[in-house]
Image (cartoon, helix red, strand yellow):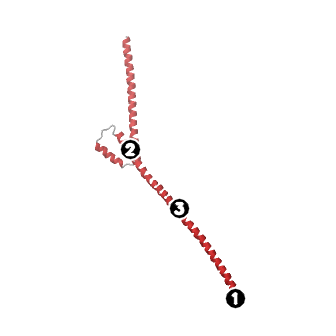
Amino acid sequence: MADKKKATRGGGAKHATNDLRDKVERLVFEKSALQSRLRELPLRHQEVVNGLKAQVEELQGKLAQPHALEHVLHKVSHGIMDLYLEVRDRKEMRDAAVITRDKDSMARTSPSVLLSMLRTHLRADLASHEDCELDLRAQLKLAASENARHISALQDRMAS
């Protein structure tokens, strides 16, 4: 029995040694895997940071777009307003104070309304010019026919 205990102890010691050796090998392997992952962390961290920086830049660009469009809309609106005032005031000599007051009130008007006002004014001016052109053509035709009659009468007079 004592031999059995010694054999068990000896076998148990070998077994325990093997278990400890296996645990050490596993721990060394885990340590090496953890060290490898630890070395990769700064690279992954930098990738994440770079990705987040790119997203921030993209979002800032998208945020700047409405401001840029608003600036363009503001410039176009003022351009339409100035064109409308120039076309409207071309025929009439207006007081500078009246023009400034009109400009201030139009500055609060939406660009689509200003564009509509300009379109309406231009159409009315075009219609007026067309009417004047038709009147001038009629006068020209009448003058030409009167001249033709006058020339015919003079020729008749010279012939007699």
Q: Quadrant of residue 137?
A: top left
Lower sequence index among marks 1 and 3: 1
User: Which label was assigned to residue 65?
Assistant: none
Quadrant location of the C terminus in the rendered image? top left
Lower sequence index among marks 1 and 2: 1
User: Which label was assigned to residue 79?
Assistant: 2
Residue kind at label 2, given as amino acid type? Gly
Q: Where is residue 157 drawn, in percent x and y? A: 36, 13
Q: Is residue 122 above or below residue 140?
A: below
Q: Residue at x 33, y 46 (%)?
A: 103
For mark 2, give the secondary structure. Answer: helix
Residue kind at label 1, given as amino acid type? Ala
Q: Which residue is mark 1?
A: 2
Q: Residues within 10 Å of mark 1 (few under 14, many from 20)?
A: few
Q: Quadrant of residue 12?
A: bottom right
Q: Where is residue 36 drawn, in percent x and y? A: 57, 66
Quadrant location of the N terminus in the rendered image? bottom right
Q: Is residue 41 above or below residue 60?
A: below
Q: Residue at x 38, y 37 (%)?
A: 125
Return the residue nearer the eye: 147 or 83: 83
Residue kind at label 3, given as amino acid type? Leu
User: Nearer the viewer's eye, disc 1 or disc 3?
Assistant: 1
Residue 59 horizontal side relative to residue 139, left or right: right
State the CA–CA distance, disc 1 to disc 3: 61 Å
